[in-house]
Amino acid sequence: VQLQASGGGLVQPGDSLRLSCEVSGFTSNFYAIGWIRQAPGSEREGVSCITSSDGRTVYAPSVKGRFTISRDNVENKVYLQMNGLKPEDTAVYYCAAEKACYLLEDGRGIRLVYYDVYRGQGTQVTVSS
């Protein structure tokens, strides 16, 4: 399985970007294709995922309502449309083949939990005025 993310760039707060993930291999064997991000000095964070079986989507609370994940099964691509970008969205974004992706609520609040098996090269997104 190979995944290649693209579409990052430098934008201003409030702008939009669309990331693309080109996927090859037997990705139908995985539960979902997801987007993960990592900001400098921070842990990797699950952003969103879309299930292989039925296209169900999951979003981290920090991006829900601003980001939209979608897939094109003909082109074998998964997209992340990012609207209303904020400086805190600055990170390297990766796409990944995942065996699990779900929302977990605990003492730290609600977060997206994922288990990635394959992760491609990332694309840098910088939101700055």
Image (tube, rainbow, N blue to C red):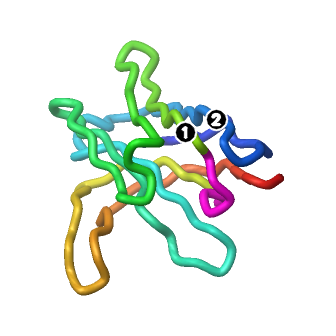
Mark 1 residue type:
Met
How many dots with numbers? 2
Q: Are the two marked residues, 2 and 1, in contact with CB atoms closer than 8 angstroms?
A: yes
Residue at 36% from the left image edge and 57% from the top image edge: 60
| First of labels 2, 1 by sequence position | 2
Q: Which mark is residue 10?
A: none
Residue 11 coordinates in the image, percent (x, y)? 77, 43
Mark 2 residue type:
Leu
In this view, the residue farthest toward the bottom is: 107
Residue 58 coordinates in the image, percent (x, y)? 28, 47
Nearer-the-camera pick, 11 or 29: 11
Nearer-the-camera pick, 31 or 35: 35
Can I make out residue 96 in this image? no
Residue 16 coordinates in the image, percent (x, y)? 64, 35
Against 5, is 62 above or below? Answer: below
**Left/right of residue 80 with respect to residue 19 in the rendered view:** left
Dot 2: within a 10 Å radius of its alpha carbon, few (fewer than 14), some, or many (20 or more) residues? some
Residue at 24% from the left image edge and 55% from the top image edge: 99
Q: Quadrant of residue 7?
A: top right
Q: Which residue is mark 2?
A: 17
Give the magenta-colored segment's residue range. Answer: 85-91
Magenta span contains residue 86: yes
Q: Quadrant of residue 29?
A: top left
Q: Quadrant of residue 42?
A: bottom right
**Left/right of residue 109 with respect to residue 7 in the rendered view:** left
Residue 123 coordinates in the image, percent (x, y)? 67, 48
Can I make out residue 128 in this image? yes
Q: Which residue is mark 1?
A: 82
**Left/right of residue 68 with respect to residue 51 in the rendered view:** right
Callout 2: SS: strand
Residue at 25% from the left image edge and 56% from the top image edge: 101
